[in-house]
Each structure stands twice: as C-alpha cells, then as structure tokens.
Amino acid sequence: MANNPAEPLWLTLHDIEDLISVLKEKHPQQPVHFGLGGKGKILSALDRPRNTWLHEGEMNLINLAALYIHAIGKTHALLDGNKRLAFLSGSVFLNRNFVRLVEPRDGFLGELVIALMANEMSLQDFQAILAQHADEI
C-alpha cells in the first residue's frame, strides 16, 4: 500500500507555516510560533525524509511520514506545539500522497507521538503501528 516508486509530494516550509497558522487558530492562548532558529530547524527536519528517500532508497510512505513526525517533533522549532505540528505534518504528507491515518479511538495517534517524543517508543515501532492504522485513499 504505502510503497510507491514515484517521488512523493514533499512538505515545504510554506506548508509548515500554513500548519502553524492552523495551530494558532485552534490554540490562540499558546505561543505556537517559531523560537530562536526555528525556521532553520524546520528546514533541516523537512530534509530528513527526502534525504532518506534519495540516499537510502526508502519508498514506504508510512516510514517517510514517521520520519517527518520524528524530525519535526524533535527539533523543538516552536515555543509550544511541536508535537501537534509534527503529527499534522505527517498526516498532511500522507494525505498529499493518498494515504490516511485511521484512529481506532480518539487520541490514540496523539498518544503514540507523545511516546515517540519521550523516547518511550522506537521509531521502528512507531512506523509499524502507523502502518497498521493507514489506508489508501
């Protein structure tokens, strides 16, 4: 399902800025904006899945989305909302490439992202669980 030899449609800094705007609207009381060096950190995080695709031959869209989630969440580019931005970014990437995530219950995928960011789950385990909850659209 999630293996595709064609180049995926990647996220851009503009996409991230749009997602930050959405987060600001949903959470106006929280400082959801770039911190010191935040744009540079995001640009670096955005390169990780594409470089993995280019140089390591990773074709699995779920694995690439998990790399977006991990890289964006771990950069701490925002003052607040890093995990939310990370999850939204991975979801948008998958949707853009005709895959959607399906939660078995509310908050399930958010809990996984929290566990991944807290190093309570490996990236490989996170990728495997995401794959179990993804469908082509």
Image: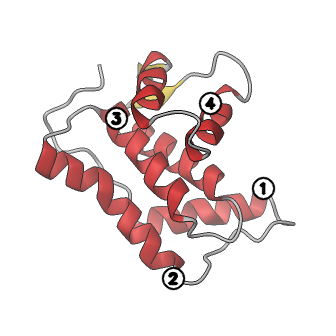
Q: Earlier in the sequence, mark 3 or mark 1?
A: 1
- Distance from the alpha carbon under mark 4 to that under mark 2: 28 Å
Examine the rendering and report whether any part of residue 42 can be seen: yes
Q: Do the residues labelled 4 and 2 touch (CB within 8 Å)?
A: no
Position of residue 81 in the picture relative to residue 74 (left or right): right
Q: Which of 124 and 33 is in front in this view?
A: 124
Q: Where is residue 40 in the image (x, y as percent from the top left)?
A: 43, 78
Q: Position of residue 117 (x, y in %)?
A: 58, 46
Quadrant in which residue 114 is drawn: top right
Q: At 42% across and 40% down in the image, what residue appears? A: 66
Q: Is mark 4 on a helix, strand or loop?
A: helix
Find disc 4 in the rendering and name its residue: 109
Find disc 3 in the rendering and name its residue: 63
**Amino acid type of the residue that numbered disc 3 sits on in the rendered structure:** Asn
Q: What element carries label 2?
A: loop
Examine the rendering and report whether any part of residue 96 can be seen: no
Q: Do the residues labelled 3 and 1 touch (CB within 8 Å)?
A: no
From the viewer's perspective, is residue 104 above or below residue 92? above
Q: Are marks 4 and 3 in contact (CB under 8 Å)?
A: no
- Distance from the alpha carbon under mark 1 to that under mark 4: 18 Å
Find disc 2 in the rendering and name its residue: 37
- Distance from the alpha carbon under mark 2 to that under mark 3: 27 Å
**Amino acid type of the residue that numbered disc 4 sits on in the rendered structure:** Leu
Q: Do the residues labelled 1 and 2 touch (CB within 8 Å)?
A: no
Position of residue 21 in the picture relative to residue 9 (left or right): right
Q: Earlier in the sequence, mark 4 or mark 3?
A: 3
**Amino acid type of the residue that numbered disc 2 sits on in the rendered structure:** Gly
Q: Residue furthest right?
A: 29
Q: Earlier in the sequence, mark 4 or mark 2?
A: 2
